[in-house]
């Protein structure tokens, strides 16, 4: 009997979507990335740990030896969770940034206190999620070491700031969320004290269908994250 060993993939980038997504927001633009793998667990509301285990299983199924993460929304929390609690291909990379995130509410989202508000905030209705609430995120974050946090580089976006008449990504969500925000994640709650703040971009929103373009459609930033990814 002859056994064939499938070659292990090195230097991949795993792109992780957020809460309840039915598609990976970057999957339609593979040209922005080098050696990308687009994770998808469609329409799920799960804890950061459950999410992490699915990502690790995805990496093993695809025979990935070494990889970094780019996470949207909850996907950024998942990257930090894996760095903190699991030995993985993330630990086999060298150079560059191990975890990059976009629009991640590391300190929770004030709309996550109920299923109705969470569905409104994220544009979907998959039920409430304690890990995305301020209390749940605070509890989760208390277990994330400074070393794991230092692996994270995070980007944020908001509507246009300084507008005398006010601005918004979603007028309805501005009644629920603290200002400023991206229509889902509030700027004050996206900070990660141990991480590297890569700056805020105005006139970009969390998802499609809001007042400005979706943050993950910034191909210049996508290509920058790709170039900066640890391999």
Image (tube, grey):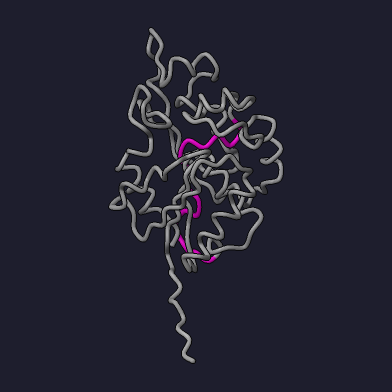
> Magenta segment: does it hold 17?
no
Residue at the (38%, 8%) spot, across then down: 164
Q: Give left or right: position of 112 versus 187.
A: right
Q: Nearer the viewer, residue 194 or 182?
A: 182
- Of 68 and 44, the residue lying toward us: 44
Q: Decide if residue 200 is on the left or right side of residue 75.
A: left
Nearer to me, 135 or 126:
126
Q: Find residue 202 and report its image quarter.
A: top left
Report x, y in % for residue 9. Answer: 43, 69
Residue at image x 47%, y 35%?
103
Range shown magenta: 92-108
Position of 90 relative to 183 (above/below): below
Q: For the point 42% across and 64% down, which residue is it?
A: 11
Q: Main secondary structure of the magenta part?
A: loop
Q: Report x, y in % for residue 41.
A: 50, 48
Q: Is residue 210 left or right of residue 55?
A: left
Q: Residue 169 appears at what percent x and percent y?
A: 41, 21
């Amino acid at each position: 009997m002859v056994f064939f060993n499938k070659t292990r993939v090195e230097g991949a980038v795993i792109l992780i979507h957020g809460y309840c997504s039915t598609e990976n927001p970057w999957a339609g633009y593979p040209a922005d990335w080098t050696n990308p793998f687009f994770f998808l667990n469609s329409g799920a509301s799960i804890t950061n740990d459950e999410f992490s285990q699915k990502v690790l299983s995805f990496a093993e199924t695809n025979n990935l030896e070494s990889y970094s993460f780019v996470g949207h929304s909850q996907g950024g929390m998942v990257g930090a969770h894996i760095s903190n609690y699991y030995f993985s291909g993330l630990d086999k990379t060298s150079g560059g940034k191990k975890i990059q995130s976009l629009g991640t509410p590391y300190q929770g989202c004030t709309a996550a206190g109920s299923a109705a508000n969470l569905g409104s905030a994220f544009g979907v209705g998959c039920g409430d999620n304690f890990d995305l609430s301020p209390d749940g995120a605070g509890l989760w974050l208390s277990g994330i070491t400074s070393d794991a946090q230092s692996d994270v580089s995070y980007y944020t976006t908001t509507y246009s700031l300084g507008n005398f008449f006010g601005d918004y990504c979603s007028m309805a969500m501005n009644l629920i969320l603290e200002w400023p925000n991206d229509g889902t994640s509030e700027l004050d709650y996206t900070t990660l004290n141990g991480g590297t703040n890569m700056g805020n971009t105005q006139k970009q929103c969390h998802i499609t269908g809001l007042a400005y373009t979706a943050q993950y459609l910034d191909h210049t930033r996508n290509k920058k994250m790709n170039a900066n990814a640890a391999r």
